[in-house]
Image: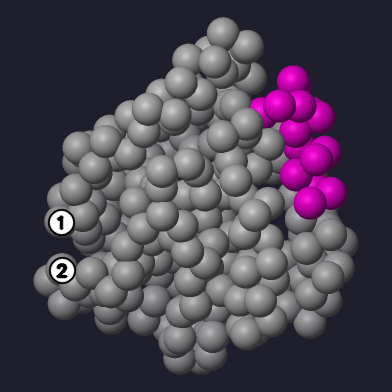
Amino acid sequence: MKICFVSDLHLFSQRSLAEQWMPLLHERIRESSLVVLGGDVFDFKWSIHGSAQATAEAATQWLQALMHTHPAHTFVMLLGNHDDHPALRERLEVLAGESPQLVVETYLFRVANTVFLHGDSANPRCTEAKLIRSRSRTAHHRTRGRAMNLLYGGAIRLRLHRAGANLIFPKRLVARRLLGYLGEVGQGPESGTDTVYFGHTHLALQDYVYRGVRFHNCGAPMRGLKFQVLLAETGAMSP
């Protein structure tokens, strides 16, 4: 079973270069039978649309168009810290109720021995309770204004975002933290997990092995960062 995994597109942010990668995304979807959208696909914090409702509407239209283009595929929408927003959740619930193509998950999705998650559980000493609290604090992102956007844009041009990500999220530390979280929620290696796909850190990663588990990350389509749309190969879907 081939699964397309993509995360951290940060659509609707001025910094996102995701549109340049749409042909590759469609290609990878055609090569797969299931698509996992791994969180922060949309960006409510830095949205150019000006309001949460307008951003949620644009996100819904984008997702509907993607599903319409690939009507034979199932899409799993995993939420991240930039798109786990009530305005989007409401629309996703309606859309999932209308279409069997869409499955909505908040924190984690598993197929056989492969786990998919956004990756904000790589924060220090993260537990299920801490992740819930963290998401609740970011669930009502207010769109940043012009001044903050200019500052963030300057940081991107200077590639400070890349330096910061490397400093905050070294791969061995991230892998250790993710395994700690997965163990806490009963999805660690002792449950059979041997592969993890995640996002959030914006650092592309493929086949990094830590304690017998392989880790993969798409990176992010922003200036100065590497990005990849990944294909996972796994066994049949667990019941």
Depth check: give the residue in front, 202 or 179.
202
Q: Residue at x 62, y 59 (%)?
A: 21
The amino acid on which the numbered mark 1 sits, given as a three-letter code, is Arg
Specify whether residue 232 is in view. yes
Q: Amino acid at mark 2?
A: Tyr
**Quadrant placement of the C terminus:** bottom right
Mark with earlier residue (2, 1): 1
Q: Are marks 2 and 1 in contact (CB under 8 Å)?
A: yes
Q: How many marks?
A: 2
Q: Residue at x 62, y 33 (%)?
A: 13
Highlighted range, magenta: 47-62
Please check the rendered image and state whether residue 156 is part of the magenta-colored stretch, yes or no: no
Q: Position of residue 103 (x, y in %)?
A: 67, 64
Could you tell me what secondary structure mostly forms the magenta stretch?
helix
On the image, numbered disc 2 is attached to which residue? 210
Q: Is residue 48 magenta?
A: yes
Q: Secondary structure at mark 2?
A: strand
Residue 224 locus on image (x, y percent) = 41, 43
Could you tell whether 239 is left or right of 206 in the image?
Answer: right
Q: Nearer the viewer, residue 98 or 49?
A: 49
Residue drawn at the location 76% of the way across and 71% of the way down = 101
User: Looking at the image, can residue 137 be seen?
Assistant: no
Q: Looking at the picture, does residue 213 appear above or below residue 58?
A: below
Helix, strand or loop at label 1? It is helix
Determine which residue is flagged by label 1.
172
Q: Quadrant of residue 66?
A: bottom right
| Residue 19 image point, x, y percent | 68, 51
Colour scheme of the picture = one colour
